[in-house]
Image (tube, grey):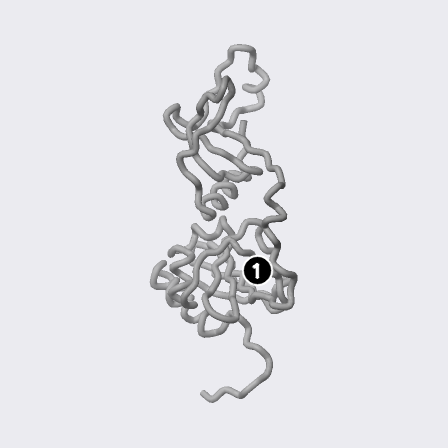
Amino acid sequence: MKQSKSNTPKPPATEAWIAELTRVLTEAGGNEPILRRFSSDQDEMPADMLWWQASGTPAIFIGVGAQDAPLLPLNLSELLKNTWGPGEITDQIPATADGWEVWNARFANDVNVRFFVAPENPAGPARPNLEMLMDIELPLVIRFGQTQMALRDIARLTPGSVIGFDRGADEPVELLVNGHVVALGEAVSVKGSYGIRISEISSRRERLVTSSLAAGEPTI
């Protein structure tokens, strides 16, 4: 079918991409999801996002909420490479621009996953200079474990009471920065004080998913 020429840019999420996305999700999940477009003012973007940046120009960003990404039948990066083209997960956050879109994929098990598609805005604010942020101090917390207790049990606590946690004695402890798990390690003694020897640095995906899942769980 012959298309008429227009000076208006095509929306970033084209019908071709949606058709291919539907096909790949159907093959991977066994059921065809229903994809529906929402206007950008009808949906609120989650606080924790995983962003994927397409290679080439103009730069297109596709984001999925950190809690929604594990619900997809395929890894987010693999899914978008197979449907949009070359690209990669990025720590860069797109400058909000006019024309970003929201697509909701509804699966047969009533699971909904929203895709946020945004073009890089060349007229938007300049990218922040990260060097200006390097001197900001953030709280670091070592978490040995967590558990849930009934209020009546907490009220009965006395000196000498022992509380068990969900983490084994031989398991690594978690290092949290501003509530986000960023690393694992082992507790050590440093000149008579507690310290932590880092054994593993979490990936950005793991940090976001872990912190999102833990956000609603009471800890002690």
Q: Position of residue 103 (x, y in %)?
A: 52, 64
Residue 131 location in percent, x, y?
59, 49
Mark 1 = which residue? 94
The residue positioned 60% from the left and 37% from the top of the image is: 138
Q: Residue at x 56, y 15 (%)?
A: 157
**What secondary structure is found at the residue carrying circle 1?**
loop
The residue shown at (46%, 54%) is 111
Q: Nearer the viewer, residue 99 or 155?
A: 99
Residue 60 to residue 189: above or below: below
**What is the quadrant of the C terminus in the image?**
top right
Type of residue at label 1?
Pro
Tell me the quadrant of the picture where the N terminus can be found: bottom left
Q: Between residues 162 and 112, which one lies in front from this camera angle?
A: 162
Left or right: 125 as drawn, with respect to 14:
right
Rendering quarter of residue 165: top left
Q: Is residue 49 above or below residue 166?
A: below
Query: As displayed, is residue 136 above or below residue 123?
Result: above
**Residue drawn at the location 47% of the way across and 47% of the way down:** 204
Task: Examine the rendering and report whether any part of residue 182 can be seen.
Answer: yes
Badge 1, how many Cα within 10 Å: few under 14, some, many 20+?
many
Up-down: is 45 above or below 23?
Answer: above
Residue 120 pos. (x, y %): 57, 65
